[in-house]
Amino acid sequence: MTVFAMPVFDATVIYDGKELFKGQGAASMWAEKLASEIKGRVTVEKIGTGWALCGNVDGVDCRWGIHGQRLKRLE
């Protein structure tokens, strides 16, 4: 199963209209899963009151948050 189809059962916060991980620990755990999926380095970054996942896919810097209990790329 792809990590993008797995439910995210961690606490979240809404900041600037984006749903983010509430804690750094939960974000770090999902960063490891995402890194394995995309076969690249993924870090966590504090955005306002929450945490997002950050990485690079096909030469493009990306950030991921949560949408509907799934990981979603942030615009």
Image: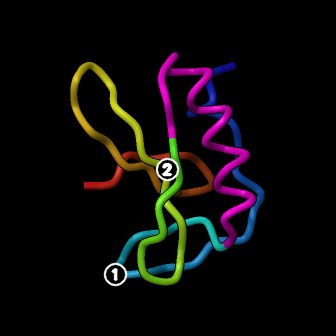
Instruction: Kindly identify the residue that appears in the image at 53 percent across and 46 percent down.
Output: 71
Magenta stretch holds residue 40:
yes
The residue where tag 2 is placed is 53
Q: How far from the left and from the top, in percent, is residue 14?
A: 49, 79
Q: Is residue 34 left or right of residue 74?
A: right
Amino acid type at mark 1: Asp
* Quadrant housing residue 2: top right
The stretch in magenta equals: 23-42
**Magenta-highlighted stretch: main secondary structure?**
helix
Instruction: Kindly identify the residue that appears in the image at 34 percent across and 81 percent down.
Output: 16
Q: Is residue 66 left or right of residue 33?
A: left
Viewer-side residue, 24 vs 68: 24
The residue where tag 1 is placed is 16
Q: Is residue 7 left or right of residue 15?
A: right
Q: How far from the left and from the top, in percent, is residue 22?
A: 65, 73
Instruction: Kindly identify the residue that appears in the image at 24 percent across and 55 percent down.
Output: 75
Q: Counting other residues with Cα less than 10 Å from the Cα at mark 2, is it few (<14), some (14-19), or many (20 or more)?
A: many
Label located before the other in sequence (2 or 1): 1
Q: CA distance from mark 2 to mark 1?
A: 16 Å
Instruction: Kindly identify the residue that appears in the image at 70 percent across and 51 percent down.
Output: 8
Task: Tell me: residue 33, above or below residue 10.
Answer: above
* Quadrant housing residue 18: bottom left
Task: Tell me: residue 19, above or below residue 56.
Answer: below
Amino acid type at mark 2: Leu
